[in-house]
């Protein structure tokens, strides 16, 4: 039947909790997942109500953040499960989470920026060759409710440096304008070399 089963799997996994001691936003929460008609259960989630908040993000009434997220596998469970494991630890290591920004002119809130940076960091972690075996295992190993990990010794890879075009030198055939506004034409190899020399 293609990517679907002939009969649904209706076994449910449940997880629930509460954070009633928070005067600002007491809550009770629950998560239920079911594979249904799909061949594999690929979704994962995070529900954590005791994420310590640094002083610059704390309110008078609450010193803990509540992090909830549902991650859809879209053709493979490993990335959704990987995100469940590492999201909170990576979030709490982001610069805008750890330390107050030096200026107040940012468009996105510190928490919003920390979330954006977290998802970029998770992308870089998934690309680490040292994490390939873990991702392969996560393809078939379903996580326990509430299971989490820290980034460990591998850490979070740094952002890739993007160079501006100002510092890029073109090698090979370049286009040359005749200074009269006429259409550019391919330059000869000698002209290309001169052009390259003059731009470096």
Image (spheres, rainbow, N blue to C red):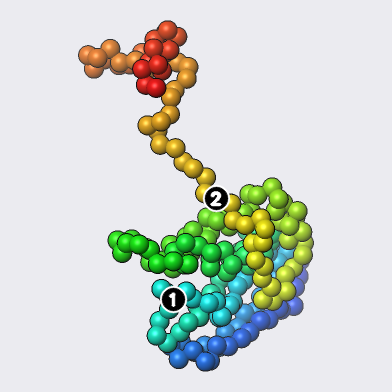
Disc 2 is placed on an element classified as loop
The label number, if any, that marks residue 6 in the structure image: none
The residue identified by callout 1 is 55
**Residue under the image location 39 percent in, 85 percent down:** 60
Indicate the position of residue 83 as horizontal and vertical percent values: 62, 63
Indicate the position of residue 170 as horizontal and vertical percent values: 44, 22
Q: Is residue 27 left or right of residue 153?
A: left
The residue identified by callout 2 is 158
Indicate the position of residue 39 as horizontal and vertical percent values: 74, 63
Residue depth check, mark 1 versus mark 2: number of the one nearer the observer? 1
121, 27: nearer the viewer:
121
Proximity of marks 1 and 2: CB atoms separated by less than 8 Å:
no
Sequence-wise, the earlier of marks 1 and 2 is 1
Q: Is residue 109 left or right of residue 65?
A: left
**Residue lying furthest left in this view?**
180
User: How many residues crowd mark 2 within 10 Å: few (<14), some (14–19), many (20+)?
Assistant: few
Disc 1 is placed on an element classified as helix
94, 45: nearer the viewer:
94
Picture quarter with the N terminus = bottom right
Q: Is residue 4 left or right of residue 173?
A: right
Residue 16 visible = yes
């Amino acid at each position: 039947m293609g990517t679907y089963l002939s009969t649904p799997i209706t076994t449910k996994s449940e997880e629930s909790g509460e954070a009633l001691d928070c005067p600002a936003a007491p809550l009770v929460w629950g998560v239920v997942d079911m594979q249904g008609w799909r061949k594999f259960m690929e979704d994962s989630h995070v529900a954590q109500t005791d994420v310590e908040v640094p002083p610059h993000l704390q309110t008078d009434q609450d010193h803990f953040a509540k992090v909830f997220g549902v991650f859809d596998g879209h053709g493979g469970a490993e990335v959704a499960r990987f995100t469940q494991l590492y999201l909170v630890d990576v979030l709490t290591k982001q610069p805008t989470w750890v330390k107050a920004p030096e200026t107040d002119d940012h468009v996105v809130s510190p928490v919003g920026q920390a979330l954006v940076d977290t998802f970029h960091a998770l992308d870089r972690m998934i690309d680490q060759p040292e994490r390939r075996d873990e991702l392969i295992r996560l393809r078939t190993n379903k996580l326990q409710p509430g299971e989490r990990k820290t980034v460990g010794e591998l850490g979070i890879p740094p952002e890739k440096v993007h160079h501006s075009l100002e510092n890029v030198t073109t090698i090979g055939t370049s286009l040359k304008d005749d200074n009269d506004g006429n259409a550019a034409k391919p330059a000869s190899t000698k002209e290309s070399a001169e052009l390259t020399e003059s731009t470096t």
